[in-house]
Amino acid sequence: MNIALTVNGRAHRLDLEPRRVLADVLREDCGLTGTHLGCEHGVCGACTVLVDGEAVRSCLLLAVQCDGRSVRTVEGLAGPDGEPHPLQRAFSAEHALQCGFCTPGFLMLAAGALESDPTIAADPERLRELLTSNLCRCTGYEPIRRAIQRALLQDTRKPPERSQTGSTAAIRPASPDQL
Amino acid sequence: MKPAAFDYLAPATVREAVDALADTSRHAQVLAGGQSLMLELHYRRSRPDLVVDINRVRGLDRLDVRDGALHVGALARHRDFESPEVAPGPLGRLLSLAAHHIAHPPIRALGTMAGSLAWAHPAAEWCAMAVTLDAGIELRGPTGARVVGARDFFHGPHLTARRRQELITAVRLPLLGDTTGIGFAEHRRTQASFAVIAVMAALTVFDGVVTEARIGLANAAGTPVRAYAAERSLVGAEAARPLSGPPEHHPFARAGGIAAECDADPRARPYADVAYQRQVIAVLVGRALNQACEDLRRLSGGDRR
Amino acid sequence: MWHGWTRREDERLLTGRGRYVADIVVPKCLDAAFVRSAVAHGRLREVDCAPARRVPGVIGAWSAADLPDLPAVPRAALTDLSTPQAVAGREWPSLATDRVRYAGEAVAVVIGADRYRAEDGAAEVGVRIDPLPPAVSTVEALDGSVTLFDGRDNVALEGSAGAPIDEAVWREAAVVVEARYRQQLLLPSPMECRAFLAVPEGGRLTIWCSHQAPHRLRDELARVLGLAAERIRVVVPDSGGAFGSKSATFPEYVTAAFLAVKLGRPIRWIEDRAESLVAATRGRGQDQRVRLAADADGRLLAFELNIDADVGAYPQLGAGLPMLTASMATGAYTTPLVHATVRSVLTTTTPTYPYRGAGRPEATYAVERSMDLLAHRLRMDPAELRRRNLIPPERFPYETPTGRRYDSGNYSAALDLALKTLDYGRWRAEQAQRRAEPGAAPLGIGLSCYVERSGGEAAGLHEFAGLEACPDGTVIARCGTASSGQSHETTFCSLVAGPLGLEESRVRLIEGDTGEVAEGVGSFASRSAQLGGAALRQAATVLIGRARERAARLWGLPPGEVTWSGGTLRSGAGEPVELTLGDLVKATGPLRVDERIRAHTAFPFGAHAAVVQVDPDLGTVRVLRLVAVDDYGVVVNPMVVAGQTRGSVAQGIGQALYEGVPYGEDGVPLLRDGLLDYLLPTISEMPPLDMAETITPNPSTRLGAKGAGEAGCIGMPPAIVNAVADALEVTDPGLLRMPLTPDVVWQAAHAGEGR
């Protein structure tokens, strides 16, 4: 089956078996291996991409469903001149990635949300709800949360926080006084 | 975990979709949001010959209120229900509470209410919602259209009254009156897991006394449960919200116990034997009713939407 | 170009240019899919691959009968973790031959033009198995009714640490607590499942694999394939996490490599999550019985730990791991008598392997849960009980009754810092207030003092590092470790650049490539910085010495007259001359040093604390706060180490509260919907965590680093379970078995109410 797919601004004409999921087509037919497959049943979120601006699981979409639509992957996150996206800078600054396998999915999840509604980064509860979408087995998530907040502030000049004290006090109590 | 091969059609109209489903020699599968179907395809537990993708059918994404009901098109996504503005009054508030418990944002961006009903997973919030609200499920098949009431729709896990040649075109959810308070309580092992149990409640109160109660239970049996016995126990009871957790003889606690013992039909699952599920049902029914009371109190305080 | 990346790894991983095994494009590469047993235990009667061979796009399909030369899974060439005695007569065929011994065991392989086609073929393979009774627990496997291997019993290994304790000690002690604990099976679950690509070319074989020990993988594959080791090159590209689960030579690797050679075609096996959940390694799996004796003042007299470990169907690395638990059974205390026994029991489940912590979480749990039981019995504050018994700093090195020599430590300093960081007194006050208030949600505080072991065991306590100075002034560092997310490029390059006085960007790391790195042990047991880092540091010192010698010869000076600073050599006498490292190489030829370091086992330690609140109606545990005080010796990169702590704590929370593998009566794991059933913690499950550190250097290396990376898995589970027990005032430890899912906690909360 023939489809037209725009990926990171580039038009692709593809002849595909209907059963092939978007993630496989991005990786194999478009050569964009930044989108990773971690579970292939929609739980882990490593394959999250933007379809028409919306963060979705690319393992839970057939590529043929995306005929005529526009897809954005982690490879399309940086500016045209290679200038890193604020999220990319912030993830690095906050050490929000270790092995990096889940990272593209988290970046696209956050990119979709921030681009449609930047206020989410300032709302701890909504940000938590959003980030519960994806799994990371390395970082313990807190640096990811901080990175997204930092990206919103666009303040990537600050050196990474070296403090050993972390807190998600805004979400849950850290001392009896906050109960 | 790659799907087996299938043919694919993306009809533009309901008629075309129904025509595609009409060929009984082929096992056809409707693809709406796909967020459950794709999982089944990846596991090859579903191996259709033909996938009928209805996402390009015009008009199916409509959500509108008419004739005292919210009409939910087959392509209305879970996310459309996140805001209480989706429907006037208590119905919008109840749907919004439930929507935030469904999976997570990327799934909610695509998954549909109609698809949930068609999939009929016992833990699905929307299935329990449909029986709680006496939803009407609109089906279109080769011989015409029909409406099946939610109470007759669910026959078992992943089994419904929908015939294989039929498409769910819409779900009709009756509005709730302004004197109805709503509550929703869900218990999960992690925030991203399916509900161990979910309970939704709508209490209609006149002069401080319950005149009508609706209680629905998700994952409390092989099909969504309407807790009729518990509801009956509440009619005529005083709708007073206890300060902290209903004491044993409070009508809400009693209703919880009845829902757990009489209405529910739990099956043992990993991490939840039958006794534990009954406990959770009893507790959550109490909490959902409490919330409904609180909702009413806010309403009478003038905070009407 | 932007240059603000914090880690050297970050730019490629954040822009989608990382290269994991599944990303590597090799022309004409084929995909493998395995047909797996749906039965836990049975006689394999028939495997019919013929229908699969007829499927379009299928290149071939084979059962064991079709591949008589297919080698078996090699015994791990690593210390004594799987002994010849344990393995003899219990060989693990790479494809099942006449018997299947766990659900998920591979019975056939299908090679297709791509994974879709390979799976199409796999779906058509006919498999007939006559079921035999399963034995998924040690109790079932020890009762004699099910034997996994004809002619041998189900006990793969027996051992002990310490001397047996005289019964009189228990009789005469003022207090003895006894308990049984369960360490559930866990799935390590890196986000990238296993991944393997074999490319044969002109009698050589290149393997791309997400792996922790590439040299061992090379040697084991060479052995079973009958190839000289130098004809196999193993390359570890970017790796999507490992946590101990990617450290062995698995049946699928043997099969894929064998077929690549046989067919002369590149073949890859990219494990999917469904396979991973049944067939990938699992960790832990111990049934423990303990006795702990103390005098009336709470001074520990004796501790006894009996372990029956369920190690899965074939004795592999996991069969020896319980011995590590036994040898660490002393914990952080001066207990004079400690005795631990081990039986590694074969069960009809997927074989166990190391998983983050590997043997130490089990030991810490046994000791630390027992300490809280004892404190409760003595009506003593659990912090005070611990303080009375911690090994004091002046007694290091400390020889434990279980045969360990703890290198250095100040255990009570860590405990004190944890209590202070937590504000222990305030939480106790809060708890007292709640206990007085009817209807208040129960709150509990749990502590855990751990001492762990890093670096590995005697036979593996060495590592290779090389440095090569290039004419352009850059330095290439080589190390025998292999990163799976631990930031080696960043940390190791800085470790070398520092003493050489070079900018970090002038140093480039090559690791995880047996074609480029002469030898190596790998990355596991928190050993990379401790050993690899120390080896690189040593190599830097040697390199400077060599450079000075050369410059001295060049300038006709005694070496003592040549100084080194900031990457430049200068004459200290006569005519002032100077030369950069690059110019020296240009002038005198290649300069390369290869160093091998040996070190002792190190013993990091710390104190963890948890505060939880329990909903007694639903049994839900809400962790309000965690504190992790860890002493890893000298910390090379605080940011990276903090990341390791946080990540390991998350996995510790997973073990305590969420993760587990339930089995049906047929012995098959109940994980039908994958990660919707095996629940990994999400951000919503992460409580506030405060981290603090003490630093007691590793006395065995100049670098002074001990291992960091597993602490959270070791210290946190008992802290959390102790907190739940404290909240509910549960004294029967059998009621609180991990994972503390709501049903377990609810039952514990209401035990004795005659439910």
Image (spheres, coloured by chain):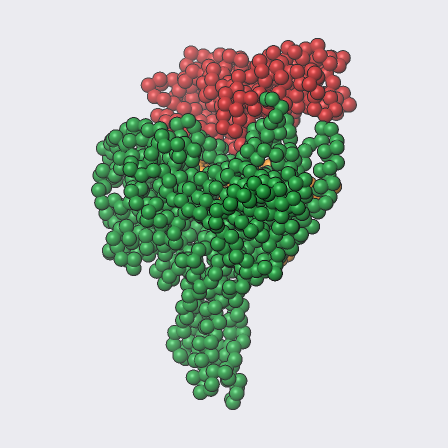
Chain colours: A orange, B red, C green
Q: Is residue C629 above or below residue B195?
A: below
Left or right: residue A22 compared with residue C334: left
Locate the N terminus of chain B and report the quarter of the image it occupies: top left
Q: Position of residue B94 (x, y in %)?
A: 63, 23
Between residue B117 and residue C700, name the one nearer to us: C700
Q: Residue at x 39, y 20 (%)?
A: B21
Q: Position of residue B174 (x, y in %)?
A: 61, 16
Q: Is residue C620 above or below residue B229?
A: below
Q: Is residue C733 above or below residue C365?
A: above
Q: Is residue B13 visible?
A: yes
Q: Position of residue C299 (x, y in %)?
A: 62, 48
Between residue A9 and residue C535, name the one nearer to us: C535
Q: Position of residue B79 (x, y in %)?
A: 57, 30
> What is the number of callouts on the image?
0
Locate the C terminus of chain B and report the quarter of the image it occupies: top right
State the residue lying farthest toward the bottom.
C574
Q: Is residue C754 above or below residue C241?
A: above
Q: Residue at x 31, y 51 (%)?
A: C221
